[in-house]
Amino acid sequence: MNKKNQPQDATASRTNTPTETQQLNRLSRLSAEEACAALSTTLSGLAADEAALRLKRYGPNRVTRERQPSIGRELWNRTRNPLNALLAGLSIASYLLGDVRAAVVIAVMVVLAVITSFIQEHRSNEAAARLRSMVTNTSSVRRRGLASDDGFSEVGLETLVPGDIVRLSAGDMIPADLRLLEAKDLFINQSALTGEAMSAEKFASACVAPGDDPFDLPNICFMGANVVSGFAQGVIVRTGANTFFGELADQVAGGRLPTAFDIGVSKFTWLMIRFIAIMVPLVFLINGMTKHDWLEALMFAVAVGVGLTPEMLPMIVTVNLAKGALAMSRAKVIVKRLDAIQNLGAMDILCTDKTGTLTQDRIILKRHLDLHGNDSERVLRYAWLNSHFQSGLKNLLDVAVLEHADLHRTLGIDSGYAKVDEIPFDFSRRRMSVVISTPDGRHLLVCKGAVEELMAVCAGYETDDESAPLDAMHFASARQQTDELNADGFRVVAVAYKEVPELRSAYSVADESNLTLVGCIAFLDPPKDSAREALDALASKGVSVKILTGDNEIITRKVCREVGLDAGAVLLGRQIEHMTDDQLGPLADRTTVFAKLAPAHKERIVRLLRTRPHVVGFLGDGINDSPALRAADVGVSVDTAVDIAKEAADIILLEKSLMVLQRGVTEGRRVFANITKYIRMGASSNFGNMFSVLGASIFLPFLPMAPIQVLTNNLLYDFSQTAIPTDDVDASDIDKPRQWDIGNIFKFMIMIGPISSLFDYATYAMMLFVFDAWHEPALFQTGWFVESLLTQTLIIHVIRTAKVPFLQSRASTALMATTAIICIGGIFLPYSDLGQVLGFSPLPWTYWPLLFSMLVAYGLLTHWAKMRFVRKWGM
């Protein structure tokens, strides 16, 4: 389920005012200098002290949905849970019926559940905020007073103010509403605001005519969009909540559909509520007709309703998720959204690029070769010029070229070379070009890119000794050279140039023609030493890894072979283009490696895998990965990723490593296992209690337990369960993906629940026929109270594990402690003054050995039934 779905027609409901539209129209018609003047700034940017003053005036550049919820909001979120609403209603009913003690106990339970959940959620929100602060998005800003080589410095997005001059390149999020000052082949995606999936091209020139819709203004960009390709500079007009995105923030945030985790918890909650809706009227009618005291019957029915309510579920879920998030942070995994933890644990397929996951993400330029395979300084020189002068997003290949040799001094960049224009990279051309002027006044277009795509626009070649037209033989020789380098694990990039005879200030893709191929540069990205171990660890956890890469098949096979991953039949992007979804779905399920993929291919593969059905994770860090990150059940990125990838992800890794991700998967499953312990316990116990209460109500001449005793029993039991989030988890609980399965929980409830009812009836028989409690309601009620409390509290140790409890698997110290406290308290309660107030009577000493025998028998029988269940359906 796509948790990042946005409203499809946000445009229709946005709240821009005529004044705001007029302001944007006015700015769009001004020149760059006039627009800056209208915003009290200059093309050279704000002074640092002026920016600080404006930050105080306008506030941080944050939208509403990113702010911490208030304490009042957190309390309301906890209180409005349907289980708490049900309990509050039962408390009011008890008060109106005159049972003040019951009303107070129920109210205490509600307050306990709300306060405990609130404290844990508040702590988890604060912790999550601290964790998210470790993953910062920045923007490139020109400010006077900040030292930098090119006038731009990286500052946090939250510190941007109106009047700041910002620089944009592929992969950047638009940091605020802004007016473009310069733009080159700029395409942006603003679907979060308009619902329009197609990228929109933007220009910096002044508009001639005003527009009715601000989003149609060609030189205005809005927060919430992101740069697909090209680069630009702009002046910020509005920030934070004053942006269009800020006005839409609540609607956009509310558009997220519930995840499988949300749906699973909700289904269980309403399953219990339906049981209560049937049981309460039934118990009321049976006791009213058999005891002829309708008021007492009603109070007992209310108490039974409380006893069947799993009021600790919200707290158990919140505490588990918060604890998991903190544990994952220690494993260098930052959780942006708490319920993504469960999706991570349920993940059975991980799609990822090979760079940085299977390889070291440490690109080294090793070869610079001409068409004949000879080392060539000419190739290195042209490659260096291209990487140095490009202003777009410099990737690791560019960094490797620039760091390979000190050509700055050799080429004399500071004395003659200058950039004229740039043709940015995009994923369809798979190449990028810069146009530079040389010291003698010529214009050179220098292009580098994927071998096949670049050679397609080359007409000739050149080496140190010769130049000639490219023919079929040369194409074949270049492909053979590339294949040989790929087979040795090298990534190959071709380099070409042409001298432009007509000097111009602007160039376009059409100028990338009739180029002269000078050769190629070859990079080595060594496999990670830990990659094989990480793949084995994920496989042992039931997670299969699929490689989705833009690289070619040969080099991808080489890397997979070195890390022990069987590539099998590789599926290529060009093959995917000709397949329908029905054809691609089954093939995607069987295929391990996909190569030469475009961003749309990655998104389509992830989407189809989810329909198989699988829980799919996607690990990516580039702009080309953002569609797939949004399509996955759980998107995973790294703190060094481009802004849009970090924004699209649910989980952020502080280290790009499959081993780190494997630890996150393990913690996600640990959280899920502890939540399901409480759910299995509550479901089976409540189902058994249903039969016990109904049977006792039919044949007993008095209530099987007083309403206040039922509530006390439930309150003590709830306390014993508060330590479940601290519990240890068996290796078998985290060895494979775990998903919500209400059907499995229902079967567990049907199989285990009646066993507790069986021993309740054995207790009834013991109290009636051994201790002759037919005419001593207090004695009967005390005996069942103690047995019910001890069996419910102790049986969690049987249900929490598929192994032999206490011997093969022991609970955490905290859970053992709460169990011991409640059991000891329950044993001594009948002999205390409080017990007298609650209507208990002291139990004879002969009761205890009989009870001990029943507890042992109950534990053994439940363990036997549990093992049968595990063998047949699994835990």
Image: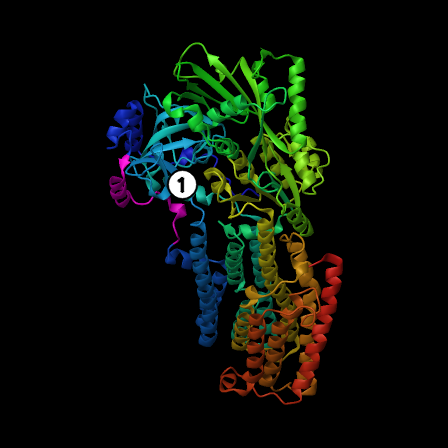
**The C terminus lies in quadrant:** bottom right
- Of all residues, the one furthest to the bottom in this rendering is 845
Q: What is the x, y in percent for residue 760?
A: 66, 75
Q: What is the x, y in percent for residue 709?
A: 54, 77
Relative side of 463 to 125, left or right: right
The residue type indicated by label 1 comes to Thr
Residue 246 is inside the magenta segment: no
Relative side of 229 to 63, left or right: right
Q: How is the image coloured?
A: rainbow
Q: What is the x, y in percent for residue 740?
A: 62, 53
Query: For residue 675, what is the image quadrant?
Result: bottom right
Q: Kindly tell me whether residue 872 is visible in this rendering.
A: yes
Give 873 or 543, whichever is nearer the viewer.
543
250 shown above or below 364 = below
Q: Which residues are magenta?
A: 46-69
**The N terminus lies in quadrant:** top right
Query: For residue 771, what is the image quadrant?
Result: bottom right
**Residue at label 1?**
138
